[in-house]
Image: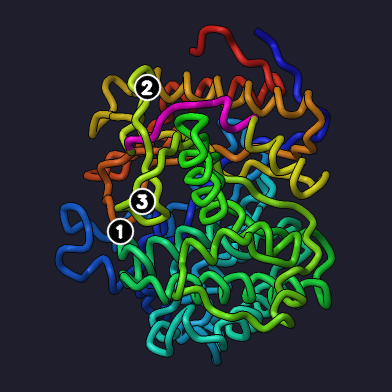
Amino acid sequence: MSLRFPDGFLWGCATAAYQIEGAPDADGKGPSIWDRYAHTPGMMVNNDTGDVACDHYHRFRDDIALMKRLGMQAYRFSLSWARILPNGTGDVNPAGLAFYSDLIDELLANEIEPIATLFHWDLPAALDDRGGWLNRDSADWFADYARVVFQAFDGRVKKWATINEPWVVSDGGYLNGTIAPGHRNRYEAPLASHNLMRAHGAAVKVYREIGRNEIGLVVNIEPKYPASPSNADVAAARRAAAYMNEQYLDPALLGTYPVELREVFNGAWPTHDPADFDLIRQPVDFIGINYYTRAVVRHADDAFLQAAVVHQSQSTYTEMNWEVFAQGLTDTLLWVRQRYGDIPIYITENGAAFYDPPAAHDGRVRDPLRADYLQKHLAAVHDAIQQGVNIKGYMVWSFMDNLEWSLGYGKRFGIVHVNFDTLERTPKDSALYYAHVIASHGEILSKPL
């Protein structure tokens, strides 16, 4: 099967700073909330930390050389805020800026386009001490940080993302305590969400003053399908979709929140200053969509959202217990166009965690399930393009195995295997398959390599 993608379609891969860099206090870097969280007993599987991770801080040139060999045209990475501003605000750390400057230069020297994400969950610890995303000043802190990096790198970096997956920050960090900073408070979650969106808008506003290229927001979308046509299940799916998907895209693109959130949070839903939406709804150049799975939802009286996910017994599930459902990606992309208009879209993350051995065997890592996942989802992207969705590029998650946040090193998303004892990198069969796709500009084999 051969599916040709549009001219100029951008093929690449993605990572996040805390998951791969290591070097948590090197060259003047300040601590982040993840440095604290990972060293808090009981928070991380196997007490894993990001202290070494993939040691990308010291090995980035070799990693970029491997990207080049695989044919990557773009690399989406995140900047560590605390590496650049150790206290979150105030004095800039020149060594932190120099690291990312060298990284960007190395990418450009290898003809790989850098795509920089300002915030991928690792808030400076000094700002958490001041309330973190619960403090309305966080939008100003973020804008000041954004100004520093825009002034340093815009021009060499032509595509910027403000915040990665604000839903995960709020739901995991402030409602359920599953990621840093580890809070569990229904009243905090909508406040954190709102300030994250204000910070996004503030950074875009700064970029419009001094930037010359493109900036957007990255959200994780998980389409919600009702388990039955019953009114109760349909309503449960609507609440779940409003909470996870529309809570962030609606204010950014429509200037409002979905009405269902008042029902979801009830008395915990705050009153918002209408002027905040003028800040949040800044014009963006693209939306980044992170897609992994869908949810089939039924009504459940005893659950948050009064909704529960129904396991699909006929489906394949990943190591994250996420259903493999490629049609959901096509449905998501069509939904975004229908609800928000013909805005350019990048698939900024898409991938799967399946079991891989700790070490390569004879220089090879066979991962047929991951290759099959990529094949199906790339076909889903192509289907959406054929139906008129303006999709500009695709970034596989992830370039290499890394720290899967609080789940530690046991969940491998990489198309490049990392032996965490030796840090040796080995392209998996899925990487070779993806390299073929890139080289042929979208030829998707009926039988993956």
Give the residue at the far front of this rendering: 231
- Compared to residue 59, the image places residue 96 above or below, namely below
Residue 335 is situated, as x and y percent measured from the top left of the image, at 69, 39
Residue at position x 83%, y 77% in the image: 209
Give residue 54's mark.
3
User: Which quadrant of the view contains residue 251?
Assistant: bottom right
> Earlier along the polypeptide chain: callout 2 or callout 1?
1
User: Which quadrant of the view contains residue 67?
Assistant: top right
Residue 434 is situated, as x and y percent measured from the top left of the image, at 56, 25
Which amino acid type is shown beneath numbered disc 1?
A: Val
Q: Answer left or right for 31 relative to 445.
A: left
Q: Answer left or right for 407 relative to 275.
A: left
Q: Is residue 357 visible?
A: yes
Which amino acid type is shown beneath numbered disc 3?
A: Cys
> Which SS does the magenta portion mostly show?
loop
Q: Is residue 204 magenta?
A: no
Q: Nearer the viewer, residue 192 or 147?
A: 192
Q: Nearer the viewer, residue 147 or 275?
A: 275
Q: How far is mark 2 from mark 1, CA to CA?
A: 33 Å
Q: Is residue 325 magenta?
A: yes
Give residue 52's mark.
1
Front of the two marks 3 and 2: 2
Give residue 316's mark.
2
Q: How far is mark 3 from mark 1, CA to CA?
A: 6 Å
Write the start and end of the magenta stretch as one range: 321-330
Q: Is residue 64 visible?
A: no
